[in-house]
Image (cartoon, rainbow, N blue to C red):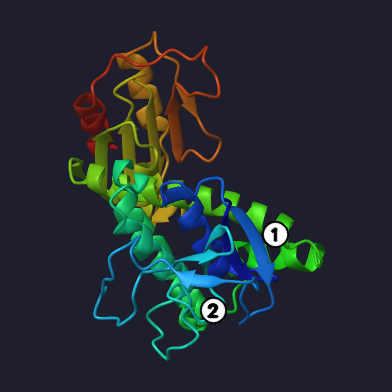
Amino acid sequence: MSRIIVTHMRPDLDAVGAVWAIKRFLAGWEEAKIQFVPAGERLQRLVSKRLASSYEKKQLNAKRYTLDAIEKIDDDEVIHVDTGLGPLDHHQTSDDNTCAAKRAWEFVVINAKSPIKNHPHGLEAGKRLMDIICEIDHFKEVTWPDAASDRYEITAPRILDGLKLMERDDDTKIMDFGLTLMDSLFHAFKNKVWAQEELKKGIVFETRFGQGIGIETLNDDVVHLSQRLGYKIVVRKDPRKAYVRIKASPLGIVNKESIDLTAVFNKLKEMDPAATWFLHVSKRMLLNGTTKNPKMRPTKLSLEEIIEVLKQI
């Protein structure tokens, strides 16, 4: 007996996301084979029987579709996603708040043996990821700010589109790349969810350039997230390695003043001369220790001591 996931040829992000959810998080389906059929069609075999007894029929978010998605076809167990008008397809409904990837995710989440329950922040990260895939599958990205900007050409769906132009006849290669892409996106979303939780522990302080925030955490994404949230100065201390990163607004000018961390650099070197301090040429990034250079010596200064210096700039 084999387990097979069936989706349409020339898989898009929705099909890839649905296959990824099944392979990564439905217990026993990690090594399932993937087969491709023309869009809207099904795997053609001799006998097809729905395995309704394998999973209890459920309703999610008031959608009236059942999750008896596993079929017995000949001697194999088969799941169709984004094709064949089954439970994990969405082309039979006008509901633009659902898609194949989202339905597949909901399917694995309710499965009692799904390993997704062992992923810290995984449930929230997966939900957010699938919500965005759903937006894209219904072409709602055209409503995003500055929708025609080149910046969107390096997003996941456009990268996948580019690969499909390169590999016109190799659905397996497209899917393999897409699954790796989904793994990366999932980890990025988990890291963001974690960073948002970590920021709640941050120390907010005032500088003449505006509000800053300092936080001691293993999560390095808090730096970028804090800047996107509008903080003008961000300092992060690694509690494990004691490394410090200080970043100021990349705009360079705030309140008509140029941000320059040179004075901070000089003061911290005076306070802890044994530590290795590096001031970026932009004068808006100050580093103490980095995984890119293990020879750099971390500071013995506390986060609070560093924040006091930043408040005086």
Horizontal side, residue 230 vs residue 20: left or right? left
Tell me the element at label 2.
loop
* Rendered view: 64 above or below 124: below
Q: Nearer the viewer, residue 88 or 199?
A: 88
Residue 157, by quadrant, is: bottom right
Q: State if disc 2 and disc 1 touch (CB < 8 Å).
A: no
Q: Quadrant of the C terminus?
A: top left
Q: Residue at x 37, y 80 (%)?
A: 97
Left or right position of 5 against 168: left
- Earlier along the polypeptide chain: callout 1 or callout 2? 2
Q: Residue at x 52, y 33 (%)?
A: 280
Type of residue at label 2? Ala
Q: For mark 2, what is the residue?
A: 147
Lateral position of residue 22 relative to residue 59, left or right: right
Going by the numbered disc 1, the residue's amino acid type is Ile
Return the x and y of residue 76 as percentages of the image width and height.
56, 58
Residue 28 screen position, x and y as percent: 45, 46
Q: Where is residue 261 shown, x and y percent of the image?
A: 40, 36
Q: Is residue 5 visible?
A: yes
Please give the residue where the numbered disc 1 appears in the rendered image: 174
10 Å crowding of disc 2: few (<14), some (14-19), many (20+): few
